[in-house]
Image (tube, helix red, strand yellow):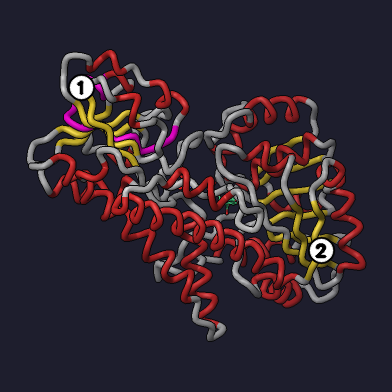
Amino acid sequence: MKICFIGTGYVGLVSGVLFSDFGNKVICVDNNRKKIENLKKGIIPIFEPGLDELVVRNYKSKRLFFTTDINKAIKESDIVFIAVGTPTAKDGVSADLKSIYEVSKIISKNINKYKIIITKSTVPICTGDEVENIIKKNNSTSKFDVVSNPEFLREGEAIRDFRYPDRVVIGSNNLKKTRPVLEKLYEPIIKKGAKFIATTRRSSELIKYAANAFLATKISFINEIANLCEKVGSNVDDIALGIGSDARIGSRFLRAGPAYGGSCFPKDTKALIKIGDKFKTDMTIVKSVVKSNENRKFLLADRIIKILGNPKNKKVGFLGVTFKANTDDMRDTQCLKIFPKLLKEGVKISYYEPTGEKKELKNLLYKKNSDEILINNDLVVIHTEWDEFRSLNFNKVKFRKLKIFDMRNLYQANSFLNKNITYYSIGRSLNDKKA
Ligand code: UGA
């Protein structure tokens, strides 16, 4: 099948590359010339383990193409995926759909045969209707269908998530025609056991928001339980195991930590509230989740200050600054809200991040490895759960007192009993009682 992906961000690039790996001819389009030139040379704009190899392999096999020529790419394709960004708009809550609508106009001018136009970007309910209207308005004679096909992959796990998803969701108002084509496209994935769910376009659009909001709710729930554990002397890891073993609840996304971050949950929860407002439905649960998650970052900053005692001129080193491991993405990362509060209290902050120095943190001191963070600080905060932080070299601090605040519960408190280290974690009682 001939496919084109408009937009080579996370979703567009990963999906495009993997569809080409399944044997399809895929053209990836972007209006960023530099990005396209780099991709042709095998230089990947994002940090995603394993993706570079797949790009090079499929590009060399002439199944994968990169171009800025959007008109030609659309004309040559049977299926056109729209995978451009839908960031939070200026109002701070809605999704900005400007790029989606601009691309729809361009598509309308290039429909030379029947095409399936698919929105893969996360888009509010009724966006598919609007895309269809735009195309019809500019081109009333062509035959096409607009389908919603949300993506559920996670950054850092994107390749595995794309190849082995729990389900593939498509939403169309003409399933008779579109379903067989998309079932064929997704055949390699369905054969491996993924459910294929076909529904209406609006339902499919809502599934994506409901899924992200539900996962965000699960995380916020366990984070609030962790707060309670700290007060009553319980262990949140045991609570997560105890409730997660109930198949009705499920064990995943119950890791307590430093609030959820990233480019999806914060944006999509806010957008879902806005969609609710538009349709006069008060999304009270999602509203509390957003509030709880925002508060959590300030609560953790306060806890750091409490652990330090007198924070002025104390040195705090952060291990990891991205919103989770295996990504270099700094969008809505938790520490961006924690740092200003600490700086205001006179704390001196340094950090080490496996994906390198960050432009967002240019006023903070960057260290080249975790040893330098362990040696030089009063308190070390494990902010991101990178594997390399699971076996830190604590011999570096043998003769010195150090406090560690493990925001990802990578360690057990009893491993520090005979060391000069005071260990604090999330939702576990030993030492936590004091801060
Ligand atoms: C999320 C969803 O998991 C994907 O299914 C979805 O496709 C994607 O958004 C999207 O809409 O594009 P992602 O943002 O890449 O994926 O990352 P997650 O692994 O979901 O983590 C999000 C945040 O939640 C991170 O800050 C992570 O540390 C936190 N988290 C996750 C927890 O604090 N506890 C958990 O148990 C799980």
Left/right placement of residue 15 relative to residue 198 reads: left
> Residue visible at 52% across and 62% down?
268
Residue wearing tag 1: 420
Residue at x 73%, y 38% (from the top left corner): 18
Asked whether, in this view, residue 320 is left or right of residue 162, the answer is left
Q: Give the answer, above or below, for where 253 lies relative to 394.
A: below
Say what amino acid the circle numbered 1 marks.
Asn
Magenta range is: 372-385
The residue depicted at 50 percent of the width and 68 percent of the height is 271
Q: Which residue in the structure is indicated by mark 2?
A: 198
Are there few (<14), some (14-19), or many (20+) residues within 10 Å of tag 1? some
Q: Residue 288, percent across and down?
A: 41, 69
Which of the two residues, 432 or 376, is positioned nearer the viewer here?
432
C-alpha distance separating marks 2 and 1? 58 Å
Label 2 or label 1, whichever lies nearer to me, is 1
The answer to whether residue 17 is left or right of residue 91 is: right
Does dot 2 land on a helix, a strand or a loop?
A: strand
For badge 2, the amino acid type reads Ala
Residue 169 horizontal/vertical position (percent): 75, 58
